[in-house]
Amino acid sequence: MTTLTDPPKESFRLSMLIYDTRYRSTTFQVLALIAFLILIGWLISNTAQNLAELGKEPSFRFLGEPAGYDINQRLIDYDSQSPHLRAAFVGLLNTLLVAVMGCALATVLGVTIGVLRLSKNWVVAKIMTVYVEMFRNVPVLLWIVLVMAIMIETLPSPSAFRGADPEATLKVFDTVALTNRGVYVPEPLFSRSLGDLHLFGNSALNFNISLDLALLVAVLVAGLFVSGRIKHRADRIQEATGERPTTWYLRLGVVVIPVVIVLIALGFHLGYPELKGFNFAGGTHMRNSLIALWLALSLYTAAFIAEIVRAGIMAISHGQTEAAAALGLRPKRIMNLVVLPQALRVIIPPLISQYLNLTKNSSLAIAVGYMDITGTLMGITLNQTGRELETVMLGMLIYLIISLSISLVMNWYNERVKMVER
Amino acid sequence: MSDLSYVRTEMLPEQAPPATAVGIIGWMRENLFSGWFNSILTIAAVLFIYMVLSIVVPWMVSPTWEATSLANCREILAELGREGHFSGACWGVIRERWIQLLFGFYPPELYWRPILAFVLLFVALAPVLFAEYVPRKLIWFSALFPFLMPWMLWGGTVWNPIAVVAGFAIAYFVYKAVDTAVGSIAAMIAAVVAAIVWWLVLLGPVVAGLSSIIPLGFEVVESRQFGGFMLSITIGIVAIVVSLPLGVVLALGRQSDLMIVKAICVGFIEFIRGVPLITLLFVASTLLNIFLPPGTNFDIILRVIIMATLFSAAYMAEVVRGGLAALPKGQYEGADSLGLNYWQAQRLIIMPQALKISIPGIVSSFIGLFKDTTLVSIIGLLDPLGLSQGIRADANWNGIVWELYGFIALFFFVFCFGMSRYSMYLERKLQTGHR
């Protein structure tokens, strides 16, 4: 007779936490979590102890106190009696302003340079290579301070524009004044203005939106929408009949004509900069710091965008172009219908991350005295209130929110254009 | 029967291609003047190059090397009949200040120390960068160099670096001892604990004791005397060396199946990548002392290096993660089917390939980090840009722009361009694909 031996009893031993693969990962995770929590707790207790010794209690009440400093470049009303919160808001708007301007210019420059670098013309391609290598391999901070220094040292002072025979003259048909105190460009004015829309009442974050501008944007968006519908209809007709109706004049008309009508109705004209006393009056005054930051960031980022565009176009295999040519498409349509749609899929994600880099690099504004969120909240407000913990944390949080929202847009785009694979 | 047809029995000799299709003329026809548009583009580009060179070259050729101030430069140039903005460069500022731009306010009699450290840096880099041309034994020197360099720059007793290295030796011996007695995982934990106890608790008294018995060492140089390119290179090198392993660990953490570990790594990476470096430097200069135990006050350069390293590690982690994701799944499965455990698979199969794929990304984040060292001028350290503000504020050199910034830009360009070329060379060398 044989006896069945019982299988060894499944008793839990402590050593199984390490040696049994079923439990090991859990053990390590719990250990990691404990270590992490201890680290966080240690930092917090240190902070509390240090702050207690310094006699500072963490609080954000300072944000409501008057800031007491001026900000010369701003998009909304602000004076030195405004609270710190409003100063930070002005700074945030300035950050966004330079970021949007920089992204626009960098894209235009970058795409042009990237395409030219692929040009069959040897000299042009080499010049673009030199541009890219020059800007990519030198720190952006150096470009910013260099452009600033050039503007201050080489541009004429406003007084040079005075007199019957001035040393300096206005540029671009007498409308733009380049001076060492900044650049004065014509400003858009409306003689039959609709006025402003005041938002957020009396809170620290109140601001005005020009109704003229809002109306223009609304009309433009509506025009683009209608234009899109016309294209859609033309596509349908082409698929049904093979004939594509000519629509370009219709599509252009619905965008341009309403905008022109609105501009005339609002009495649009330009206000030109004029020399009054020792300085220019009228026009929009863009300070040196803004211009230097804008140009340097755009030129620097354009070098990276150029490389992205080049890599994107080169990533499309030659077979695609050849197949399209074999189908009888003309070079321009090959570009529009075959190469670009595929290249954009490669180009857009790194392009957006370059936008993100540009936005983060705009924090270097502090080196030239442009008052962005780093200059206001983490600069002067920090120095005046001595609240380093709160201001730096708040500043980081704001940057984090900006970055994460850009990342969200990127993920959404990636999901949308993802190639359907088997 | 007579032949009706003519049949050629030998080939005609090859004719040379037309003179317009080969050689320099052919090349020019193809690349420069292939159409009217291309020709216009070429001419415009050549004119542009001529214009730039006709301004830059005369400007650079300027006999102002001995000048003592900007006004002096202008006098020299005026004597030669050259006036205006671009009449000539003022090289006197470089002659007078280049030593300062290189070393900051480092004591002049000790310049040999950073110079020697810099030379040894290349000796230490050689086994890593050009492994096949140098003896393999030299890799030991490379491993020791990270401890040698800070000692050479900052000075102090020789027992400091030796004691720090001894920590690793202690960890090794503890591991060996416990491994035979108990087991490998316990040995690992024991080794880490032993090393940490040595570094945090025993190191101070032991070093103090040894240096009182045998006082060997260099004169101490304070951090605030550091400056110029020396500072940029120091911060850059240390942060680069430390951030790569840290980045690999973070990338593995992010790719791992362990949920909590993954969450911590993702949180860290996304946080660091979401904020500008300058805010982290503000943390280094104002907040780090608040986060650490009361009374801790350590060196500002060290604080900056820590922040730059963490910043770079987060970017490195994303680059390495890209490499890991690009590996075909078969590689992971192949490693599993060979019976390798996680660490063996990573070390022998996954990492060599993933790192090879991510070389361009790794090097470009090194370059980014090296360029970002200029940001320390904003929190008041005297790197070349920080020094340049002082030089431009000097009454003698007030108004200098191109010469100074050009010099600094050239330095960064040489380093960064060199790094990017090296990465291309490495890619070619490690190329195993069939083409």
Image (tube, helix red, strand yellow):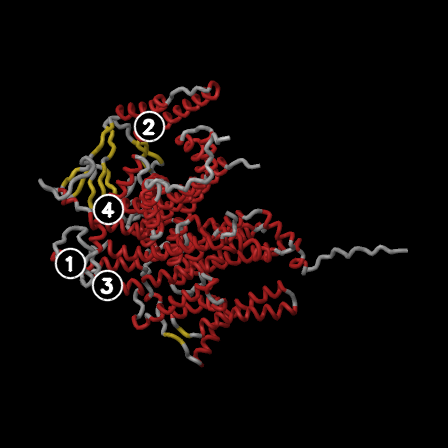
Looking at the rendered image, the disc whose residue lies closer to the viewer, 1 or 3, is 3
Residue B134 visible in the shown view: yes
Q: CA distance from mark 3 to mark 2?
A: 60 Å
Alpha carbon distance from label 1 to label 2: 56 Å
Instruction: Write down the chain letter for disc 2.
Output: A
The image shows residue A280, relative to residue B137, as above or below, that is: above
Q: Which residue is mark 4?
A: B50
Tell me the kind of residue under disc 4. Tyr
Report the amino acid beneath label 3: Arg
Callout 3: residue from which chain?
B
Q: Of discs 3 and 2, which sits in the foreground?
A: 3
Residue B91, x across and y down, in percent: 22, 59
- Res A132 label: none
Q: Which numbered disc, 3 or 4, marks the residue closer to the eye?
A: 4
User: Disc 1 sits on a residue from what chain?
Assistant: B
The x, y position of residue B334, in whole percent, is: 62, 51
- Residue lying at the far bottom of the rendered structure: B213
Within 10 Å of disc 3 (Cα), the crowding (few <14, some 14-19, many 20+) is some
Disc ID at residue B95: 3
What percent of the width, then of the height, locates residue B162? Answer: 47, 73
State the residue position of label 2: A215
Q: Measure how far apart labels 1 and 3 are at the Cα level.
A: 16 Å
Percent coordinates x, y for residue A324 in the rendering: 46, 31
Q: Nearer the viewer, mark 4 or mark 1?
A: 4
Look at the numbered disc 2 and give the secondary structure of its residue: helix
A257 shown above or below B131: above
Q: Residues within 10 Å of mark 4 (few under 14, many from 20)?
A: few
